[in-house]
Amino acid sequence: MEIRKEQIENFNQKSLRDQQENWDFFQNQLVKRGLDCSAILKQIQNLQIAIPSWALGAGGTRFGRFSFGGEPCNLEQKIDDVGLLHALTQSAGAISLHIPWDIPKDELAIKQQAAERGILFDAVNSNTFQDQNKQKHSYKFGSLCHTNRAVRQQAIEHNIEVIKYGEAIGSKSLTVWLADGTSFPGQHNFRKAFQNTQDSLKEIYQHMPSDWKMFIEYKPFEPNFYSMVIPDWGTSLMLAEGCGEKAYTLIDLGHHLPNTNIEQIVSILMMKGKLGGFHFNDSKYSDDDLTCGAIKPYQLFLIFNELVDGMEINEAANPPLAWMIDASHNLKDPLEDLMQSLEAIREAFAKALLIDRAALSIAQMENDVAQCQEIIQQAYRTDVRPLLVEARRLSGGAIDPIGFYRQQAVRKQLIRDRGENVVATGL
Ligand SMILES: [Mn+2]
């Protein structure tokens, strides 16, 4: 289904006056602080977050999966869903494909369908963490790190194939996440596993077009519980540097041990020009894949503080980042959940843009610790919702996307069109 512009405009009518009042009040606050409203508004409008093709259906846990009804069961329907999200929020202008779950069959038609909805193709993701039908060698004991050269070669060739699919649809980057690791001490020779992985990545890297980037994602544990070949940002950075200048580290918020200072990692990687991409989600314990901002919104803001700092101060060093939501939806309607995530990301970004960086720098130089906190929290405590709504409204989106979605009973229509018992591809 498609949402027409007039539908959104009609829906917005009833809250236009309230929004105007809120926006006037907000603008006054910003002017008093000496901030440039129109520049900030533009930055919010320009922030586009990719939706992964595997996040549009119900996610499962290893104990079970509960379907929703109306889930997209092919790539075309997934692009439709992202189109719907983008029409309402004006901030989901990209989709990230997972191969082989979502192989484009008719690339031209897929590209055209996406273009009509204002959707670009973000990074393509390879999958060597499960075995596919008719696959010759198993990844049970690893892929790019495997002790057997033939298994490594098969995994390398899969990644090269993913690059080819990506090229055909206009992607410009490859994300590699490996489940490779061990669950028992002694199972691996750590050095050999690392070296095999480095050599395999180098070979994949050689097959990337010159305007492509490779993102290397890390994770401390799971599915393996004793060691992972790429457990942390340091290892990812070493591998990226070993490959070359087009290889970067990718941070997934859920891929850290509890209480890791992720914002510090962001800061240092950006200083080195080696932060390539970002996967957003939230968690209480580990890789919980919950809605962004649902558990630790202050941490998300502090991360954006460093991202904004890195983008503004260090613009030349670090290339533009690839943003993506990497969450899973076990309880909520995936589309509503994604709208909540998009809004939490925009909120953290907007608040980070309000930080008085010149004053913060002075307070830091003077070691005025209380003042540093005052400056940071002054921005954090600002209610930026009128700004988020205004940016979305000006771009043609809904003042209240979830309100629109519910009023129009979109999920009901999707169930009517696609059926109650359909299951999206993915985990
Ligand atoms: Mn991820």
Image (cartoon, rainbow, N blue to C red):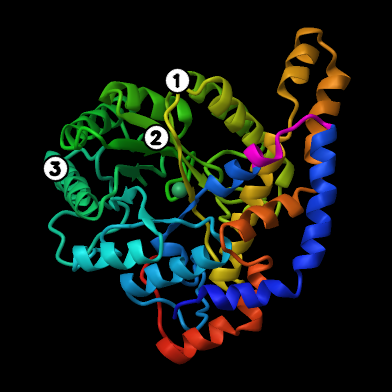
Q: Over which residues does the magenta segment extend?
A: 33-40
Closer to the eye: label 1 or 3: 1
Q: Which mark is residue 317?
A: 1
Circle 2 crowding by C-alpha within 10 Å: few under 14, some 14–19, many from 20: many
**Amino acid at pointer 2:** Ile
Q: Residue at x 36, y 34 (%)?
A: 186
Disc 1 crowd rating (10 Å Cα; few below 14, some 14-19, many 20+) is: some
Q: Is residue 275 left or right of residue 205?
A: right
Q: Is residue 339 above or below residue 224?
A: below
Q: Secondary structure at mark 3?
A: helix
In the figure, is residue 157 to the left or right of 221?
left
Which image quarter is the C terminus in? bottom left
Give coordinates of residue 66: x percent, y percent. Answer: 52, 78
Find disc 2 in the rendering and name its residue.
230
Q: Is residue 204 above or below residue 424?
A: above
Cα gap from disc 3 to disc 2, whole angstroms: 19 Å
